[in-house]
Amino acid sequence: MTTATEKLSALKSAVAGLNEISESEKNGFISLVSRYLSGEAQHVEWSKIQTPTDEVVVPYDTLAPTPDGSSDVKNLLDKLVVLKLNGGLGTTMGCTGPKSVIEVRDGLTFLDLIVIQIENLNSKYGSNVPLLLMNSFNTHDDTQKIVEKYQNSNIEIHTFNQGILTRMDGTLLAHGDVFPSLLNSGKLDALLSQGKEYVFVANSDNLGAIVDLKILNHLIQNKNEYCMEVTPKTLADVKGGTLISYEGRLLEIAQVPDEHVNEFKSIEKFKIFNTNNLWVNLNAVKRLVEADALKMEIIPNPKEVDGIKVLQLETAAGAAIRFFDKAIGINVPRSRFLPVKATSDLLLVQSDLYTLEDGFVIRNKARANPENPSIELGPEFKKVSNFLGRFKSIPSIVELDSLKVAGNVWFGAGVILKGKISIVANPGVKLEVPDGAVISDKEINGPEDLL
């Protein structure tokens, strides 16, 4: 059996022949694989964990207001870069190509909305906020073609790849870390030379992840090197790490051992989670990456690329919080976390629960409940094309609490849904909800239930 040392030696030889990447990328990759093979792990002494105070997990409503003058706002924005993580494919929703080109609302894609938002900021304040897209080996070629349509927009768009591919023991290895990739691509030095100070990092499918001047102003005033946006958990949130204070620093903890779960459940401050909206000082990124100081927990993620099995070694950007000075969390409103991971999320954002203004998805004030309705759609609705085909128009859901739909169900136009609704077609039955139907607190299994 091949030893870890032999594997590493073979990998070094393979990586040495990759002429398309820099020496620093090669060294970073070897370092990551070496840590992975050694089984290195982060150990936390749970007895030392403390609840974070409001000084380190800052309530959003305590932030100072944004400066009034447009020249002050321009000065803020001219220090900012927006970076969207654009490595995911739309395959889970039955689409080909990058997920960011799925149409979200009014014929506009995730990427269209991101560009419109930043373009509006630049036009309004005369600023120059560039957009960076971090692609994966899956999305790079397609994205390069797609961004050409924005060449006449009032926005600079730059793309770079999140890592490299090489082979070890018959398996392709990849790595994709945002901070080393930013440095190794040459983008980081170019941005610093333009006077940029902070990067706002977010997933491209989070419609709530928009530039927030109050947050940016707070970080600049307080010289915080790193900020993680957190928000209170709801019943729908099963993923996402929480923040703890540990030996004088903030840590993101994604998994709590079973024996400690109950004590965490009872503490309000731990009922928050990482939205994956991050604000990071660019000089600090350069300092830490060049010192090889960002040693986060490694997450092995098996994937398939062009029919070839790939093991992607990833580190969570949120886990980097412990290495930055004056790192904080900000407990933000839920509106800043609106990810679209499935067609059930698409139903929410395409409905009358939201409107679109200047590229921003705005929640309808007519909804009294602060939480969104829970929506569960069956496999018949999983693909975007099937989902759109089964709705003549998206129903009104402003007064909906929960919706479960499964089986051969079709919706007419102008349908209004209220309260708690279950529409599960009996086997072999085609259920057609008629145009203009108003359904409230009902369980429907056959056509007779619609009368």
Image (cartoon, rainbow, N blue to C red):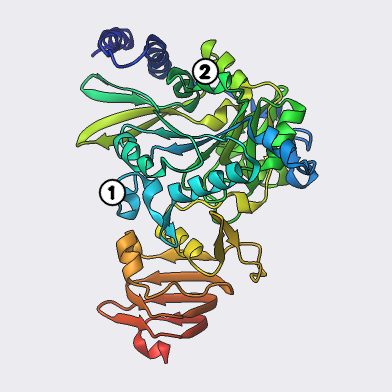
Dot label at residue 189? 2
In the depicted view, which residue is nearer to us: 330 or 188? 188
Q: Can you tell which quarter of the image residue 243 is in? A: top right
Q: Can you tell which quarter of the image residue 354 is in? A: bottom right
Mark 1 or 2: the one toward you: 2
Dot label at residue 96? 1
Q: Secondary structure at mark 1?
A: loop
Measuring from the top left, give residue 265's x and y in whole percent.
66, 46
329 vs 385: above or below: above
In the depicted view, which residue is nearer to us: 44 or 17? 17
Q: Residues within 10 Å of mark 1 (few under 14, many from 20)?
A: few
Q: Residues within 10 Å of mark 2 (few under 14, many from 20)?
A: some
Residue plotted at (64% across, 70% down): 367
Measuring from the top left, give residue 217's x and y in whole percent.
72, 35
Residue plotted at (30% across, 45% down): 97
Amino acid type indicated by mark 2: Asp
Tell me: 36 left or right of 336: left
Measuring from the top left, give residue 186's x and y in whole percent.
45, 19
19 vs 256: above or below: above
Measuring from the top left, give residue 98's x and y in whole percent.
35, 44
Rounded to the nearest angstrom, the CA distance separating label 1 from label 2 is 34 Å
